Amino acid sequence: MLVVMVGTGYVGLVSGVCFAEFGHDVICVDKDPAKIQTLKDGGIPIFEPGLQDLVKKNVEAGRLSFSTDLPSAMENADAVFIAVGTPSRRGDGFADLTYVYAAAEEIAEHMNGFTVVVTKSTVPVGTGDEVERIIGKKHNPENFAVVSNPEFLREGAAINDFKHPDRVVVGTQNEQAKEVMRDLYRPLYINETPILFTERRTSELIKYAGNAFLATKITFINEMADLCEAVGADVQQVARGIGLDKRIGSKFLHAGPGYGGSCFPKDTVALVRTGDEADVNLSIVKSVVDANDRRKIRMAKKIIDHLGSVDGKTIAVLGLAFKPNTDDMRDAPSITIISMLQKNGAIIRAYDPESMVEARKSLDNVSYAENAYDCMEGADALVIITEWDEFRALDMNRVKSLLTEPNVIDLRNIYPLYDMKTLGIKYISVGR
Ligand code: UGA
C-alpha cells in the first residue's frame, strides 16, 4: 500500500509514521519547505514522546519519506489522507475548512487511477460531501471515494493510541474504499480492534460527539469539585465512587483547572455552531463551553482568595502546557490563570519541562526558571497547574524552605492532603 499524508502537523505526522510502522509505504507531504527539511534532517517539529525514534526507524527501513511535491507523491497512491489544520474561524467558532478544500483541489488535480481520499482532519458534518464535490468536478465517481476516518489520538500518548485504539471509525459506503481501509488497518486485527463502518456523515459526527462527551465528563466532575468544597466532600473519592460503575467509567473524571488544548475547546464550540445551523439546541454542550471558560477564572480567584491578595507577590507556577508530555500551549488554562493573577498585581515566575518556548508566544512579563526549585526560590506561593511527573514527588521540605511562606496551591490534586498537613504546608487543592 502507498499512503500519502497531506499535512505534517500533529495528526498527519503521527498517523503517517504509524502507518509506516504498520508496514505500508508512506510519503508525508507538506507545503512548508522548512518543515519538510527539518523532518528530512531527522528533526521533529513537535514534541511527542517516542515519535523521533519511530520516524528514524521507518525512514531507515525505507518505508517513510517526506516531500513538498504532492504531484510526484501521488503517482501510485492507494490512499491520500487529508490531515491539514482546521482552526477555529475567527469570531464565529466554525471550523475553518480553507486548508481542507485547498488540499482537495490539489489532490483532484493530480489524482490518477482509483484513489481513496480520506479526511483525517477533524471536520464538521458534511465536509466529506464538499470534498467529494470538489474532486467530482475533475473525476468520474467510479475513480475515487471520499472517506471519513477521524483520529482519537491524545497528545503525549499519540503513538500508543494509534497502535492500540479502542476502535477505528471509517465513514464510507463504497465497497472498494472499505477494502483499502481494511488493508490499511489490518495490523490492528491481531488485537481485535473493532473497525466501525458507518455512513460518512455519521463518522464525522462521531468525532465531535466523542470529544464533546469527554469534555462534558471533565466539566461535570469539575462542578462536583466545587460542590465538594462547599459541602465538605472529597471529589477524588466521588470520582472513584461513581467511576467504578461500569456505565460511567473511571476515565476523564480528574477534577482540575478546566480542559484546554487544540481539540476540546475548538471542537465543542464548533459542535454548538453545527447544532445552531441545523436548528438543534445543544444546550448541554453550550453549558460545558461556558462552565469551562468560567472555571479558569475561578481557579485564579481561588489562588487570590487563598493568599488574601497577590499584589506585589511573586507566584511560582509549575506547569504551563495544557497537559503533561506536550509543549502545546493552545487554550492552556495557565494562560487565563496567569493573566488574571498579573492583572491583580502578581509577579509570575514559571517553569515547564517542555513548553517554555511556546509559552513565550502566549504570555507576557513572565520570567522563566531553569527547574522547579529554581522557580520557587523566594516566591510567596507555589501554584501547580500541569501535572508533569517531575512535579509529583517534589521534596516538600525543600519547597518549604525555598518559599517565603509555605503556600502551595495544587490545581491537579497530586499531593495527599494528610502529608501536606503533617509538613505544615498551607495547601489547597481542587474539590478536597
Ligand atoms: C483529546 C481526546 O482525548 C482525543 O481522543 C482526541 O483525539 C483529541 O482530543 C483530538 O480531538 O485530536 P488531547 O486534547 O490531546 O486529546 O488531550 P486529553 O488528554 O484528552 O486532555 C484534554 C484536556 O482535558 C487537558 O487540558 C486535560 O488536562 C483535561 N483533562 C483530561 C482533565 O482536566 N481531566 C481529565 O480527567 C482528563
Image: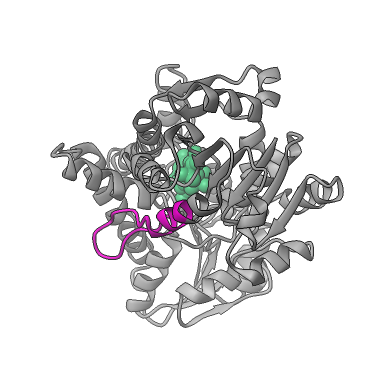
Q: Find out whether residue 104 is within the magenta segment.
A: yes
Instruction: Give 385 or 91, whichever is nearer the viewer.
Output: 91
Q: Position of residue 210 (x, y in %)?
A: 40, 34
Q: Farthest residue in the left direction?
A: 279
Asked whether 10 or 231 is in front, the reply is 10
Residue 412 in view of the camera = no
Q: Is residue 146 above or below residue 391?
A: above
Q: Quadrant of residue 81?
A: top right
At a point 37% along the width and 35% down the height, the residue shown is 217
Q: Does residue 153 lie above or below 411 as drawn?
A: above
Q: Main secondary structure of the magenta part?
A: loop
Q: At which x and y percent is residue 307?
A: 39, 67
What segment is highlighted magenta in the picture?
Answer: 85-105
Residue 242: x %, y % from top left = 40, 23
Left or right: 379 in relation to 192: left
Q: Quadrant of the C terminus?
A: top left
In this rendering, would 230 be left or right of 186? left
Of residue 168 and residue 134, the one placed in the foreground of this image is 134
Q: Quadrant of residue 161?
A: top right
Asked if one can make out residue 361 in the rendered structure from this viewpoint, the answer is yes
**Residue closer to the observer: 318 or 2:** 2
Q: Is residue 64 above or below residue 303?
A: above
Quarter holding the N terminus? top right
Left or right: 323, with 59 as reference point: left
Q: Residue at x 47, y 83 (%)?
A: 365
The residue drawn where x is 68% and y is 57% is: 395
Give how far across and how far down residue 324 sits, in percent.
58, 52
Magenta stretch containing residue 178, yes or no? no
- Location of residue 333 by image quarter: bottom left
